[in-house]
Amino acid sequence: MAEVESLETLLEKSASALDEREASEMKRILYGAPTPKIELPREAVEKAGAGNFELAAYKFPVSGEEESRPRRIVRIAVVQNEIVKPTTAPISEQKTALWDRIKEITHTASLCGVNIICYQEAWPQPFFFCTREKYPWTEFAESAEDGPTIKLCQEMAARYNMVIVSSILERDANHGGVLFNTAVIISNSGKVLGKTHKNHIPRVGDFNESTYYMEGNTGHKVFQTAYGRIAVNICYGRHHPLNWLGYGINGAEIVFNPSATVGALSEPMWPIEARNAAIANSYFVACNNRVGTETFPNEFTSADGKPAHKDFGHFYGSSYVAGPNGGRTPGLNRVRDGILICEIDLNLIQQIRDKWCFQMTQRTEIYAKLLADAVKPDFKPDIVYETTD
Ligand SMILES: NC(=O)NCCC(=O)O
């Protein structure tokens, strides 16, 4: 059965049965304040057409005018893409083909004035974690400081004056060659600003990632860039509200959520979790997911009694941006490569914080006490039972 193009195409279809007001109310209730489309340079649009990838751009409402500080307008972008070569091709060919695709996509983003771009989780590789085979797959791992993928990103970041968030499988040579699922943040100067690990490892369905890499030990780092303070909550971390809170407490203004997830598992959660994090923490979240179906040479099982198979299921793309005001952009499509660009005003964050007061009303001190108690071996849950007398 052919995959559905996108939720938005289904909504457009159903909107044709509504009158104008009903259609606009449906959009308002589902998406929040409108995020109008941005006009993009013709050259970029032509490149997207020739390269067969979607190019979509939206604008969040700007904050109200303030007397004491100028607006802080930033263009962010998230990328979704299929693997280019089959998983049976030599590793170097698979990697080089992905590098070429990302070069093309990043060049197009640069024509659109993008300041910060985030690629999808583990972008220079197929998502082989389902196989649980070590070789040849761990050969994709590389240094987060000076591996070939990072060098490529450094070169692009400097050339395009763009901050790049590049998520890779990291081989940490300083610690016995252990592996981490790592996002490397490359400054617009071309220097590596730092790295942050995936904190939570999925143990669900075919996402058997604990076979490959360790739980992260970098906490909830936030990176001060020329275009705002950013953090990266890698894929499965989006199911953990305290993980999102950690980046908020450290001052993140934009949190990227590079992902790789399949429809049968997580699609109903996808539009909710990152958006909820943006609301609860009053920051922007930009989340992206790979696309396509990846087939591997050997069969593997999902440990659910069902027959062994060679593919992972469909990665459904649908990348989007959510804002502190509760709104979100439409998603990219579910079936092919794309860049989603979003123009945001970082001042909106403080204005929403002043309006909703979540940071003022949250009770971190009582949560801290609860958590400190809950990790003790003699912890007893505080449950009140009805007495029998
Ligand atoms: N890559 C990854 O963490 N996937 C887990 C599945 C999900 O979180 O939707």
Image: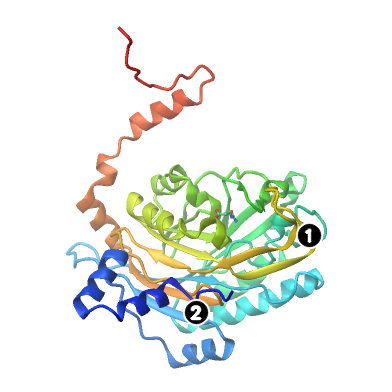
Gap between marks 1 and 2 measured at Cα: 38 Å
Determine crowd level at label 1: few under 14, some 14-19, many 20+ residues with C-alpha closer than 10 A.
Answer: few
Residue drawn at point x = 37 percent, y = 32 percent: 367
Disc 2 marks a residue whose amino acid type is: Ala
Residue assigned mark 2: 109
The verdict on label 2 being within 8 Å of ligand 1 is no
The picture places residue 359, in percent across and down from the top left corner, at: 29, 44
Image point (39%, 50%), residue name: 251
Classed neighbour count for the residue bearing mark 2: other residues with Cα under 10 Å, few (<14), some (14–19), many (≥20): many
Q: Which mark is residue 151?
A: none
Q: Quadrant of the N terminus?
A: bottom right
Between circles 1 and 2, the one closer to the viewer is 1
Q: Which residue is mark 1?
A: 299
The amino acid sitting under disc 1 is Glu
Q: Answer whether residue 101 is visible to the viewer in this image.
A: yes
**Residue 130: image location, x then y, percent:** 70, 56
Left or right: where 237 falls relative to 209: left
Image-based side of 66 in relation to 227, left or right: left
> Residue drawn at (67%, 75%), measured in percent from left and top?
99
